[in-house]
Image: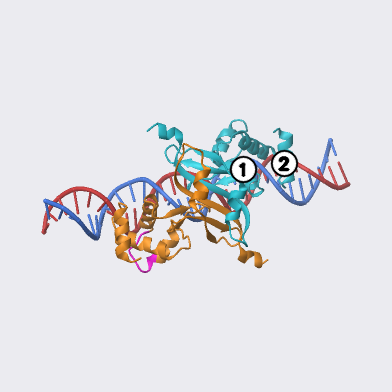
Chain colours: A orange, B cyan, C blue, D red
Amino acid sequence: MNREKLSAELRQNGLCPTQQRIAVYEYLIQHRTHPTADAVYRALAEKYPSLSRTTVYNTVRALAKAGLIRVVTIDADEQHFDAGIEDHGHFRCSECGKLYDFSLAADTVRPLLPDGFSVGMWDVYMTGICPNCQSNQ
Amino acid sequence: MNREKLSAELRQNGLCPTQQRIAVYEYLIQHRTHPTADAVYRALAEKYPSLSRTTVYNTVRALAKAGLIRVVTIDADEQHFDAGIEDHGHFRCSECGKLYDFSLAADTVRPLLPDGFSVGMWDVYMTGICPNCQSNQ
DNA sequence: TTCCAAATTTGTAATGATTACAATCACAGT
DNA sequence: ACTGTGATTGTAATCATTACAAATTTGGAA
C-alpha cells in the first residue's frame, strides 16, 4: 500500500493525512509484530527526527478510534497495536512473550453474545507456550 | 462457600490461607462485578483496617497465578479481577463502561489454535453497546 | 506452650506507560 | 500574504502497579 492510498484511507476515516500519521500507519502495516506505541516511536525516530512520542500516542489512539488498527490488551502492562483488522485472535507465549496471530472467523465469535448487545470490536486472547519454546525444554 | 473451604482451596493451590487472602478471595467470589484491585481494597479497608493496598495487589496476583481467579484486561488502563473460572467471555459497554459475562464453552475457543501451541488461559472480549444503553438513546 | 525460620503484610517510595497542557507549527481557504 | 483550525512537540503531571525493607504473622518442631 503506497502513501497515496494510505493518505486517502486516513482522509476517508476523518483523519487529516499528515506526514506523521502516514508514517505511523505505514509502519504498523509493514510491521505486523504488534509493537507498542513506544516501539513505533523508537523505530521512526531516526527517520523522522522531529517526531514526538506524544504524536505517536495520539496517532495510534486516533487510528484505533477510527477502526483502522486494533489495540491488543492481552499484555496487562502495555498496549500493542495491530494494523490487521481482518478476523483473527491473539496468542501470547508466557515463556518468550511473543505475540502470535491465529485466524478466526467473526461468525465464530459474534453469535456468542446474547440478543440485545451490539458488537463493535472483538478479540480472542489465549496464553500458553508456543511451539518454539516447547521444543526448547 | 465458607471460610473453611476457601482456606482449604487456597492451601491446595500452594497459598498460605492468611486472613487477608481469604478476605480478598471471598470478596471476589461474592462480588462478581469484575472489580479492580483498588476497588477490592476500598471495599475491604473498613472491615480490615490494617489491610494494605500492596497486599491486595500481591494477593490478586497470587490468586491469578494459581488459576483461582482471572485477570480481565479488556480495559486498557486497569486490570479487573474475576473469580469466575467457569467458561465465559467478557463484554464491555463503551457507553456505561460496565462489564458483562457471557457464557461460552472452552471447546468453542481452544480448537481455534494451530497445532503445537499449548493453551493455558483464554478469554473472549467484545465491546459495543449494552441493551440498557441502547434503550436510553 | 514456646520458639524459630520462612512467608506474608505493611507503608512508602519508585517505576513506567500514558495523558494533559500550552506553545509552536503546518496547512487550507479567503 | 492573512487567518483560523487542527496537529505536533516537549515537558510536566497522572495514576495503576511494583520494589523494597522493616515489622508481623504463620505453621511446624521441640
**Protein chain holding label 2:** B
Q: Is residue A91 left or right of residue C30?
A: right
Dominant SS of magenta comes to loop
Which quarter of the figure has residue A26?
bottom left
- Whether A47 is among the magenta residues is yes
Horizontal and vertical percent for residue A32? 46, 63
Report which residue position mark 1 lands on: B55
Q: Dot 1 falls on which chain?
A: B
Identity of the residue drawn at 57% across and 46% down:
B71
- Given contact means CB atoms under 8 Å apart, are the residues at marks 2 and 1 in contact? no
**Amino acid on which the number 2 mark rests in the picture:** Glu
Return the x and y of residue C11 as percentages of the image width and height.
Answer: 58, 41
Q: Is residue B137 magenta?
A: no
Quadrant for the C terminus of chain B, please.
Answer: top left
Magenta residues (range)? A44-52
Tell us which disc is closer to us: 2 or 1: 2
Local secondary structure at mark 2: helix
Q: Which mark is residue B9?
A: 2
**Position of residue A76 measured from the top left corner of the image (x, y, whole percent):** 53, 51
Residue closest to the eye, D11 or A43: A43
Q: Does residue A15 appear in this view?
A: no
